[in-house]
Amino acid sequence: MAPRTHRTFDALVAEAEAASVDGWDFSWFEGRATEARPSWGYARSMGERMARATAALDIQTGGGEILAGVAELPKLTVATEGWPPNVAKATELLRPRGVAVVADEEEPPLPFADGTFDLVVSRHPVRTYWDEIARVLSPGGRYFSQQVGPSSVFEVVEYFLGPQSEQTRNSRHPDQARAAAEKAGLEIVDLRSERLRIEFFDIGAVVHFLRKVIWMVPGFTVEEYRPRLAELHREIEAEGPFVAHSTRFLIEARKPA
């Protein structure tokens, strides 16, 4: 357990509100929150596939942090991103590596010709357009992705929004991804999931999380949720970290040769 800060509610919230939420870098949470990582090691596994590819596409690259960490990139490597601050950050980070960053609205169609890539990757896509992935993959090409699973961090979601429907809780289920991939004509090579422990050590970490992962509590603002945040702050101070659980699944699919 991280040490208690004993800082005031207002100080913790103000610090979290002032922090930048650009990119997909979670280093701000160091000492403030922890999350267990999936056993498969997405970044390492993705890097291994990149080293064998000839043309690769990273969809919804965020700030480009994961792709920038790959040791050996294909000669043709392209990344897409829809949020302007992230496009700028990814371009700055990836251009020196020879990666073309394309500003894309993240709605079909992908701005690439049929069969362009032998590897398409994506970490935590908001939505997966399987038909488009199948279209831009070359025969024998593969899609490799780590995705958010059902009811992920719903302890936080339901603390602020109340109980969610079973339909909402079960959305993003890996079985749905399997069915959609197969409907698009892809063959499933690997599919596995894990449930992982998260601990928030102070209310600032919760605020920063909700500002950064904006789909958890849509339209979240400190002002609107201040009473509930203050209540959670008191609980953390009295009882220790607020515990939640993320769900992740890994899916790899192949386009028939």
Image (cartoon, helix red, strand yellow):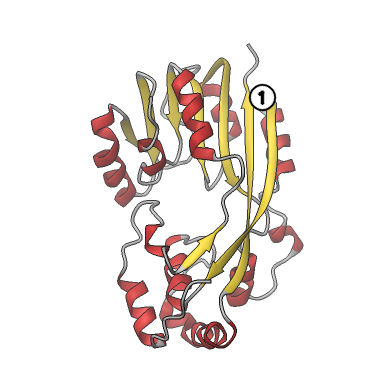
* Residue 49 relative to residue 170: left or right: left
Q: Mark 1 highlights which residue?
A: 186
At which x and y percent is residue 207? 44, 72
At which x and y percent is residue 100? 31, 29
With respect to residue 202, does 26 lie above or below? above
At which x and y percent is residue 50? 46, 25
Q: Please tell me whether mark 1 sits on a helix, a strand or a loop.
A: loop
Residue 220 seen anywhere in this rendered image of the structure: no
With respect to residue 50, does 174 lie above or below? below
Q: Amino acid at mark 1?
A: Leu
**Viewer-nearest residue: 152 or 196:** 196
- Residue found 49% across the figure and 26% down from its top: 48
With respect to residue 165, does 94 lie above or below? above
Pick out the residue farthest to the top: 257
Image quarter for residue 165? bottom right
Tally of numbered discs? 1
* Residue 20 relative to residue 182: left or right: left
Residue 112 seen anywhere in this rendered image of the structure: yes
- Residue found 26% across the figure and 45% down from its top: 88
Circle 1 packing at 10 Å, graded few (<14), some (14-19), many (20+), is many
Image quarter for residue 71? top left
Image quarter for residue 153? bottom right
With respect to residue 39, does 118 lie above or below? above
